[in-house]
Amino acid sequence: MQRIYKKLLYIRENNKVYYICIGMLFLLFSLRIFNLDCDLPPFGISYYQSIDEGLYSKMAINLYKYDSLLNTADFSLYTAPNYRVNIIGNILQYISLKILGNNYYGFRIAYVIIAMLALFLIIKTVEEITKQYGISVKNSRFFILSIMIFVIADFSYLMMSRTVENSNIR
């Protein structure tokens, strides 16, 4: 236990090692890009329904296929307000569909990027809060590494960042 504590102290105090650890954790986080085309686990395990992805992406799909946010072919399709709130996700998803094509990578990669951005914002928020409360840089680094490890290992965040889930944007 003493050896582990000494290694943690070394990481906290050494800038180069700290930034290497942050980079490695972001790399580990980016591994969720692989196998985006896999099916979701059963509902009893993940509490995510794959059918919801289509509902959250209705505007991006309409824009990609019919060049209109609300129009599908010859009839107008009503989009409920709670799905219109996800306009940022739909715009990013439309861009990724245009770049990567009509497949699961084009469909889901925008939410992986949003999850990475959210993780970055969490880190910056913790840095700012610890700075405002006068917590030392060494302890701030410990908090940041702990939070990153938790977020990367959290199954619900893993599922949210691999699927079209609008709570990731909120």
Image: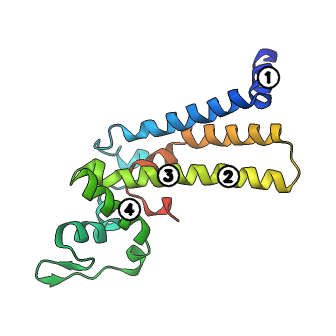
Mark toward the start of the polypeptide (4 vs 1): 1
Percent coordinates x, y for residue 66 in the rendering: 17, 72
Density class for disc 3 (Cα within 10 Å; few <14, some 14-19, many ≥20) is many
Q: Amino acid at mark 3?
A: Ala
Circles 2 and 4, Cβ within 8 Å, touching? The answer is no
- Residue on which the image places disc 1: 5
Occupied quadrant, residue 52 = bottom left
Residue labelled with disc 3: 115
Depth check, front residue: 117 or 35? 117
Q: CA distance from mark 4 to mark 1?
A: 42 Å
Q: Earlier in the sequence, mark 2 or mark 4?
A: 4
2 or 3: mark nearer the eye: 2
Helix, strand or loop for disc 1? helix
Decide if residue 128 is on the left or right side of residue 115: right
Dot 2 and dot 3 residues touching (CB under 8 Å): no
* Residue 92, numbered label: 4
Disc 2 designates what residue? 124
Q: Which of the two residues, 87 or 80, is positioned nearer the viewer here?
A: 87
Mark closest to the chain's N terminus, 3 or 1: 1
Residue at (80% x, 51% y) in the render: 130
Whether the residues at callouts 3 and 1 have beta carbons within 8 Å, the answer is no
